[in-house]
Image: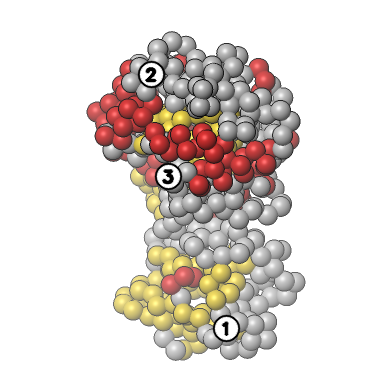
Amino acid sequence: MSSLRRIASAAAALAIAASGLVLGSSPASALENGLLRTPPMGFNNWNSTQCRAEFNEAMIKGIADIFVSKGLKAAGYTYVNIDDCWALPSRNSAGDLVPDPARFPSGIKALADYVHAKGLKFGIYTSAGTKTCNTAGFPGALGHEQQDANLFASWGVDYLKYDNCNNQGVDAQQRYKAMRDALARSGRPIAYSICEWGQNKPWTWAAPVGNLWRTTGDISDKWSSMIGKAQTNRGLAQYAGPGHWNDPDMLEVGNGGMTAAEYRTHFSLWAMMAAPLLIGSDLRKVSDDNFAILKNTDVIALDQDPLGKQATVLSANGGLVVYSKVLANGDRAVALSNETSATATISTSASATGIGSASSYTLKDLWSKAVRSTTGTISASVPSHATVLYRLSSGGSRYEAESATLSTGGTIDANHAGFSGTGFANGANAVGSYVEWQVTGPASALTFGYANGTTAARPVDIAVDGTVVATGVAFPPTGAWTTWNTVARPVSLTAGAHTVRLTATTADGPANLDYLDLSR
């Protein structure tokens, strides 16, 4: 929500972003409350109503109704969340928060029950301070964490947005951990959204505290604000993952301040960045064209991909930006985004995305739905403030390391970021250490994803069905264990089942292996 108190927010975060470069420090371990394994999808009223009188029980019930009747629930939208101004300015004699009877005459529990009856979830708001952000001064939760968490649980709340106003200078980590612990003791699973505005770099400490954290100040319904939030957030990919997400703030799609192309860019970039998709427009007034944006299931699938990877920036030159996102089935999503004021050609290649070598690839435009083939070039003429969004597929199959068999001493690990799937094969450090896949042909090439954080190559012999087909194949250093590259070898695999084994030829063992791609 908006407040003059937030003008100073996120200065450190803003310095990251225009380049889109990933920061170097390591992400913290994640909060394991079992919630938000994909980014939350839903609604929050603030962008459209703020604290005006139209924010009330009838509006929120109407939004829940529209989720069902307009197909938003079917598209994946789940949370119906209310923001500031729902409470009276003072607690009652027991110290409890009291819903405003003018806005919510039936009370919050009855409203949550209504939302739940639609098969949806209900979210609420407060601040990690003595008061919330609105100038009317509604009571915050600082010093009342357990009391408020218990009250929210008793009402059936499923999601808490926890703001940062009037925090009395108390350390941010202390305040947000206190509410985390209170929610855990409340007896109800409640998704936890940290709205700290990026002031204290929450991406470096909030993963074990909350399910998502704001990386920016508040968004507004104009191009400069939206693209600025994307620029700040896009350099933080390494910190996002299942159950812990970077949050560049809510969606403005449908509020009227941007063009259709700009709203499609907004929705595309939020999906690429695995950001929360929380609708911020009054759905009772949204046009069919904007509903079409919000319900684009091909784009939503990128945001909700179970691998949970945030897109990284492949290039950013003069406002022409290429994003790539690794997807669970081995596909890549590619966004060609034009931040400039003139139409421009933006290009990249399949190889730049790390998808692996193939004789041809399929490109599906997720807005026009056009499908075409390419030998590797990905290029489009992109109008000003527009984004062309592709799903890139190879003509082959991917076999993740998790499906491989390892020799004694080898393990499937996940302690180095950037891999595909859920882990990588860490072979034993020994001559003869191997990693073996069972695969299905036909194929004309094998491509291995790997990382080698040492200064020496890790050579292997490659065998197919027990016969060595390549000896001493080098897997050169990649510069870090979190930097992944590929090694490809031609092969002739007939249709049917085959065994592919990589065997280390030095005492260092094989490189860390992420996947095997078969290309036809």
Numbered disc 3: secondary structure: loop
> In this view of the protein, which residue sits in the foreground, 346 or 253?
253
**Relative image position of residue 296 (x, y in whole percent):** 36, 36
Numbered disc 2: secondary structure: loop
Q: Which residue bears the numbered disc 2?
A: 104
Spatial CA span between label 1 and label 2: 61 Å
Q: Which residue bears the numbered disc 1?
A: 409
Spatial CA span between label 2 and label 3: 23 Å
Near mark 1 (Cα within 10 A), the count class, few <14, some 14-19 or many ≥20, is few
> Which amino acid is tagged 3?
Arg
Q: Tag 3 or tag 1, which sits nearer the N-term?
A: 3
| In the depicted structure, whether residue 288 falls above or below residue 206 | above
Residue found at the far front of this picture: 93
State the image quarter where residue 260 is shown.
Answer: top left
Q: Residue at x 65, y 17 (%)?
A: 4
> Which amino acid is tagged 1?
Gly
> In this view of the protein, which residue sits in the foreground, 395 or 203?
203
| In the depicted structure, whether residue 280 falls above or below residue 442 | above
Near mark 3 (Cα within 10 A), the count class, few <14, some 14-19 or many ≥20, is some
Quadrant, the N terminus? top right
